[in-house]
């Protein structure tokens, strides 16, 4: 499929997991993709693996000056941006009673503040027909033991898209959320012990974890004109986990 031919995209957290699979898929569909991430070595390896239609830009999404550098680079190299995937995100466990200020700041700074300023700073480069995709999570609509802060951060992301769909009236720019259920990335496997992973698989109606290729398919759909009448929406890619 070439439905993203000539499109310019940026994916934050694009050097691993769901972001990297999305980068590959957007490239396969014809886009040029900038990937932003914190670690230069990981970014370099990912950009090399993605090939000549990708470029890495080192950036921590919590640092406004890093985001400015990303958009200056895109402006200089390509002049505009068609697709923004604000995907950088982190999770860690803490039960009520154990939640520290550091835990809260860490999660909300990256997942909420990082998403907010990534989108806001991208807007001057985006034009009519542009598509913004925020990575949410099924946990944004569920209660999750020992994950209240992460879950609340993803609920915030989901609501940002609803409100921004209003704020973007008249621009022709759409904003939607792609919410994965449990998806087989190194990060998820690192976070959860194997018995918790097995339990999670049992809770998913399709009885397995998702593959990053499957979330990438939804990102490509939301990036393309196939979703041209969608804004403010949430697309779940969760094997039914949060749907039943
Ligand atoms: P991942 O750790 O591979 O991806 C997250 C990426 O974000 C990494 O490349 C990381 O380096 C980057 N990142 C983190 N903090 C950053 C910062 N301050 N600045 C720039 N980049 C930063 O894990 P993943 O599973 O691919 O997660 C990707 C997204 O999907 C996250 O938003 C996560 O919350 C969400 N998600 C994942 C799952 C899952 O089961 N894997 C489920 C629901 C939602």
Image: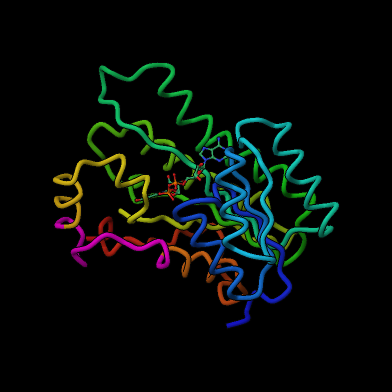
Q: Main secondary structure of the magenta part?
A: loop
Counting every numbered tag in the picture gives: 0
Q: Which residues are magenta?
A: 202-214
Judge whether 106 appears above or below 24 on screen: above
Residue 205 is covered by the magenta coloring: yes
Residue 184 picture location, percent across and down: 33, 56
Answer with the quarter of the image where residue 215 lies.
bottom left
User: Is residue 114 something one can see in this rendering?
Assistant: yes
Answer with the quarter of the image where residue 153 lies.
top left
User: Is residue 162 something one can see in this rendering?
Assistant: no
Seen at 59% across and 47% down, the residue is 43
Seen at 52% across and 44% down, the residue is 88
Which sits in the foreground, 139 or 3? 3
Judge whether 99 appears above or below 13 on screen: above
Does residue 194 appear left or right of residue 140 in this picture?
Answer: left
Seen at 14% across and 45% down, the residue is 195
Residue 111 picture location, percent across and down: 50, 38
Residue 112 picture location, percent across and down: 52, 36
Does residue 224 appear left or right of residue 21 in this picture?
Answer: right
Which sits in the foreground, 128 or 170? 128
Judge whether 104 appears above or below 227 on screen: above
Residue 60 picture location, percent across and down: 61, 35
Answer with the quarter of the image where residue 202 lies.
bottom left
Quadrant including the N terminus:
bottom right
Colouring of the image: rainbow
Quadrant including the C terminus:
bottom left
Does residue 16 appear left or right of residue 72 in this picture?
Answer: left
């Amino acid at each position: 499929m070439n439905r993203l031919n000539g499109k310019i995209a940026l994916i934050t957290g694009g050097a691993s997991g769901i972001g990297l699979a999305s980068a590959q898929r957007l490239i396969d569909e014809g886009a040029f993709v900038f990937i932003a991430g914190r670690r230069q070595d990981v970014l370099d390896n990912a950009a090399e693996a993605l090939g000549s239609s990708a470029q890495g830009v080192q950036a921590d999404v919590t640092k406004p000056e890093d985001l400015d550098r990303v958009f200056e680079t895109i402006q200089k190299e390509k002049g505009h941006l068609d697709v923004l995937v604000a995907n950088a995100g982190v999770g860690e466990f803490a039960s009520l009673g154990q939640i520290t200020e550091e835990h809260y700041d860490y999660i909300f700074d990256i997942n909420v503040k990082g998403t907010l300023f990534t989108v806001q700073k991208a807007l001057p480069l985006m034009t009519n027909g542009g598509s913004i995709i925020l990575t949410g999570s099924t946990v944004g609509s569920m209660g999750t033991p020992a994950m209240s802060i992460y879950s609340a951060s993803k609920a915030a992301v989901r609501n940002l898209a609803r409100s921004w769909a209003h704020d973007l009236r008249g621009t022709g720019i759409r904003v939607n959320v792609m919410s994965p259920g449990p998806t087989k990335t190194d990060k998820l496997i690192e976070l959860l012990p194997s018995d918790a992973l097995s339990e999670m698989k049992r809770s998913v109606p399709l009885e397995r974890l998702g593959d990053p290729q499957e979330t990438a398919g939804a990102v490509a759909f939301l990036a393309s004109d196939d979703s041209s009448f969608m804004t403010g929406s949430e697309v779940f890619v969760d094997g039914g986990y949060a749907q039943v």
